[in-house]
Image (cartoon, rainbow, N blue to C red):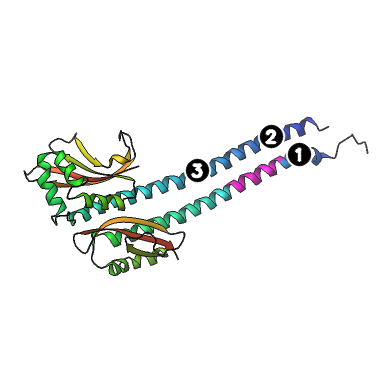
């Protein structure tokens, strides 16, 4: 058989381009997978934030809170539907919450003409 | 040495690599931008909710003399904004109410706004001088307001505004 130098065969000529194509495809699909993961993660975060807003809205809807445990309890069905937990207290920011909780503060009237800062923390769980 | 067809093949592969990289980069950028924009919307909702809830809470508030905060505002508004500033400022009867609003606020620069329906282009704002805001034009802010009638029967839009 008559062989030329460096000639592997018909496929040999295509090998370098195949490598480039495979690399490009790998890069493209890796990009798609990463984007999908980021999208899903952001989606989960947004659902959690949306749930948090609905929980805090339920607790603070009347603007005056005479009984905080009852007000907090009223948000329980919403928290359950989103798979979230929440805690609320007046005054101190250092309430016993999970480290990755969202903490919201609101100005509310507390049992009459007394204004107070209400802290509500919401976390997954 | 590779043949001309192989060289053309490599060139095509490189161009394909370029296109695929560009597409992947665009996808990643869009995924990141989507999250950032949606996040901003949720932050905006929370700020608007805070401002609205604060106004409701202020309706229940008493000043240091035990008088209803909004009733006193209604009495003072016809006399001019300086009366309101004196009422809310240090030494004023409602300074405690203002402090509580500031303490609860997610923004470091909240403001109480007063706009007469008779003069809608004029908006008076009460905020802390320590905010350091020399100009609020084009500044990001979230606000909510409620209409009240002052002692003379004129309508005022009283609002809570949160500057960032």
Where is mark 1, residue-wise? Answer: A16
Check if mark 2's residue and mark 3's residue have beta carbons within 8 Å.
no
- Secondary element at tag 1: helix
Task: Say whether residue A92 is left or right of residue B151.
Answer: right
Where is mark 3, residue-wise? Answer: B30
Give residue A8's mark.
Answer: none
**A29 falls in the magenta region:** yes
| In the rendered image, the vertical position of residue A62 relative to residue B150, given as above or below | below
Of tags 2 and 3, the one toward the viewer is 3
Q: Pinpoint residue A111: horizontal percent, then vertical percent.
A: 21, 64
**A35 falls in the magenta region:** no
- Are tags 1 and 3 found on a single chain? no
- Residue lying at 43% horizontally and 59% vertically, measured from the top left: A101
Q: CA distance from mark 1 to mark 2?
A: 11 Å
Label 1: few (<14), some (14–19) or many (≥20) C-alpha neighbours in 10 Å: some
Task: Say whether residue B36 is left or right of residue B108.
Answer: right
The mark that comes first in sequence, 2 or 3, is: 2
Label 2: few (<14), some (14–19) or many (≥20) C-alpha neighbours in 10 Å: some
């Amino acid at each position: 058989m008559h062989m030329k130098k460096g000639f592997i065969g018909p496929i040999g000529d295509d090998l370098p381009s195949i490598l480039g194509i495979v690399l490009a495809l790998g890069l493209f699909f890796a990009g798609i997978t990463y984007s999908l993961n980021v999208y899903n993660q952001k989606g989960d975060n947004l659902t959690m934030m949306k749930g948090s807003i609905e929980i805090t809205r339920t607790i603070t809807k009347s603007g005056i809170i005479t009984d905080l445990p009852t007000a907090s309890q009223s948000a329980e069905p919403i928290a359950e539907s989103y798979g979230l937990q929440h805690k609320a207290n007046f005054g101190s920011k250092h309430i016993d919450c999970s480290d990755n909780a969202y903490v919201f503060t609101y100005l509310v009237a507390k049992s009459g003409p007394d204004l107070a800062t209400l802290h509500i923390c919401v976390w997954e769980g | 040495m590779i043949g001309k067809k192989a060289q053309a093949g490599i060139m095509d592969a490189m161009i394909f690599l370029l296109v695929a990289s560009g597409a992947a980069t665009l996808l990643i950028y869009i995924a990141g931008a989507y999250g950032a924009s949606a996040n901003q919307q949720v932050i905006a909702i929370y700020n608007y909710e805070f401002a609205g809830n604060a106004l409701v809470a202020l309706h229940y508030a008493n000043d240091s003399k035990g008088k209803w905060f909004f009733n006193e505002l209604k009495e003072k508004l016809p006399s001019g904004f300086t009366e309101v500033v004196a009422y809310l400022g240090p030494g004023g009867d409602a300074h405690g109410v203002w402090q509580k609003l500031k303490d609860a606020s997610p923004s470091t620069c909240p403001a109480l706004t007063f706009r007469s329906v008779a003069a809608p282009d004029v908006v008076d704002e009460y905020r802390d001088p320590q905010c350091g805001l020399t100009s609020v034009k084009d500044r990001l802010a979230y606000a909510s307001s409620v209409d009240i009638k002052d002692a003379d029967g004129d309508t005022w839009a009283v609002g809570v505004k949160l500057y960032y």
